[in-house]
């Protein structure tokens, strides 16, 4: 188990796509989401994973994470146990100044939402910000994938 430290931002425009070195289609559901703790099943292209995350710290930047690869057939069966709401998105891997931003473009009920995350080695690690990076939303629970399954972006007052 390790501690995941990341910051999350909205994305201003689609120029990140020209800088992306790879993209992946992700579908994920939540078996459990309770008080910041989640058990997630994810299909990532032709692979599958089971992930358990603990509650985040006060800033919403760091949390415990445990993940194991599982078979695609097991993942499809586990989707039957998931609570309502499925996340469907494309993840773009965008290198910038020695770091990699993961930019998620959401579909379905979360269509129109594009969020970038950067994983850091510590909460105070400095990093460069590309032009397409917008407002920071780290710690805003509305942008957690588990919350987007319960309160999709399309239902927000825009």
Image: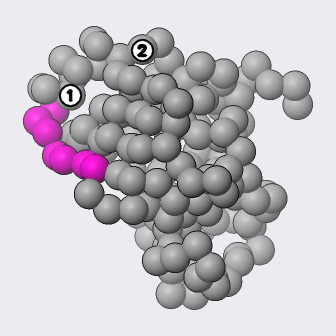
Q: Nearer the viewer, mark 2 or mark 1?
A: 2
What SS does tag 1 mark? helix
Q: Residues within 10 Å of mark 1 (few under 14, many from 20)?
A: many
Count of numbered tags: 2
* Spot occupied by residue 147 in the image (x, y as percentages of width and height): 59, 29
* Spot occupied by residue 58 in the image (x, y as percentages of width and height): 64, 53
Bounds of the magenta span? 66-72
* Residue at image mark 2: 83
* Spot occupied by residue 48 in the image (x, y as percentages of width and height): 22, 40
Name the side, left or right, on which 8 lies relative to 50: right
Image disc number at residue 75: 1
Q: Can you say which quadrant of the picture contains the N terminus?
A: bottom left
Q: Residue at x 59, y 40 (%)?
A: 144
Look at the picture and state if 124 lies above or below 26: below
Instruction: Determine the main secondary structure of the stretch shown in magenta.
Output: strand
Look at the picture and state if 97 lies above or below 109: below
Outermost residue on the front side: it is 58
Q: Can you say which quadrant of the picture contains the C terminus?
A: top right
Q: Is residue 11 visible?
A: no
Say whether residue 67 is magenta: yes
> Quarter of the image holding residue 151?
top right
> Quarter of the image holding residue 38?
top left
Q: Residue at x 35, y 22 (%)?
A: 31
* Spot occupied by residue 81 in the image (x, y as percentages of width and height): 29, 13
Name the side, left or right, on which 5 lies relative to 141: left
Q: CA distance from mark 2 to mark 1?
A: 14 Å
Near-viewer residue (115 or 136): 136
Who comes first in sequence, dot 2 or dot 1?
1
Near-viewer residue (24 or 86): 86
What SS does tag 2 mark? loop
């Amino acid at each position: 188990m390790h501690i995941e430290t990341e910051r999350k931002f909205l994305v201003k425009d689609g120029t990140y796509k020209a800088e992306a070195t790879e993209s992946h289609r992700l579908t994920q559901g939540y078996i459990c989401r309770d008080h910041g703790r989640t058990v997630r099943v994810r299909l990532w292209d032709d692979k599958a994973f089971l992930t358990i995350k603990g509650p985040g710290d006060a800033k919403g930047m760091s949390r415990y994470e445990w993940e194991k690869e599982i078979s695609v057939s097991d993942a499809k069966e586990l989707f039957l146990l998931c609570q309502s709401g499925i996340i469907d998105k494309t993840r773009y891997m965008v290198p910038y100044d020695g770091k990699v931003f993961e930019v998620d473009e959401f579909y379905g009920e979360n269509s129109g939402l594009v969020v970038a995350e950067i994983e850091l080695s510590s909460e105070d690690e400095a990093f460069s910000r590309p032009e397409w990076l917008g407002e920071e939303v780290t710690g805003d629970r509305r942008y957690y994938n588990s919350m987007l399954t319960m309160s999709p972006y399309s239902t927000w007052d825009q």
